[in-house]
Image: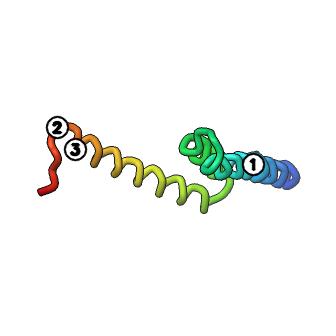
Amino acid sequence: MERPLVMRVLRRVAVLVGGGALLAIGIAMIVLPGPAVVVIPIALAVLAIEFECARRWLRSIRSTTKRATRRLRGSDASGADQRK
C-alpha cells in the first residue's frame, strides 16, 4: 500500500530537518568541544534514509575508515615501524 503524497513529503522534510540539524551540530563540533567524528556519521545515516547523496558520503566515510583501520592495525601488529 502506497503512502499518501503528504506523508511522504512530511517524512522527507522531517529527515532533512533532523539530519541537517545533526550535521550542523557535528560540523560545529569540529572546532568546538564534542565528538564530531561520531555525530557527523550519525547525521549522514539519518539523511541517507531519504537522500542518495548522503548514502554516497556515508559509504565514502565507511571505506576511508576501514582503510585507515587496516593500516593502523597493520603497523601496530608488527610492533615496528614499516618505513625504511
Of the numbered discs 1 and 3, the one sitting upstream in the chain is 1
Residue 22, position in %: x, y? 70, 46
Instruction: Give the color scheme: rainbow, by chain, secondary structure or one colour.
Output: rainbow
Of the numbered discs 2 and 3, the one sitting upstream in the chain is 3
For residue 10, side relative to residue 40 (left or right) = right
Q: What residue do we see at 60% from left, 50% from top?
A: 30
Count residues near mark 3 (Cα–Cα under 10 Å), then give few for <14, some for 14-19, many for 20+: few
Locate the N terminus by quadrant. Answer: top right
What type is the residue that disc 3 sits on? Gly
- In depth, the one of 77 and 51 nearer the eye is 77
Residue that sits furthest to the bottom in the current view: 53
Q: What residue do we see at 23% from left, 39% from top?
A: 76
- The residue carrying mark 2 is 79
Q: Secondary structure at mark 1?
A: helix
Q: What residue do we see at 65% from left, 45% from top?
A: 32
Residue that sits furthest to the left in the current view: 84
- The residue carrying mark 3 is 74
- The residue carrying mark 1 is 21
What type is the residue that disc 1 sits on? Ala
Q: Could you give the CA–CA distance between mark 1 and mark 2, rounded to whole angstroms?
A: 42 Å
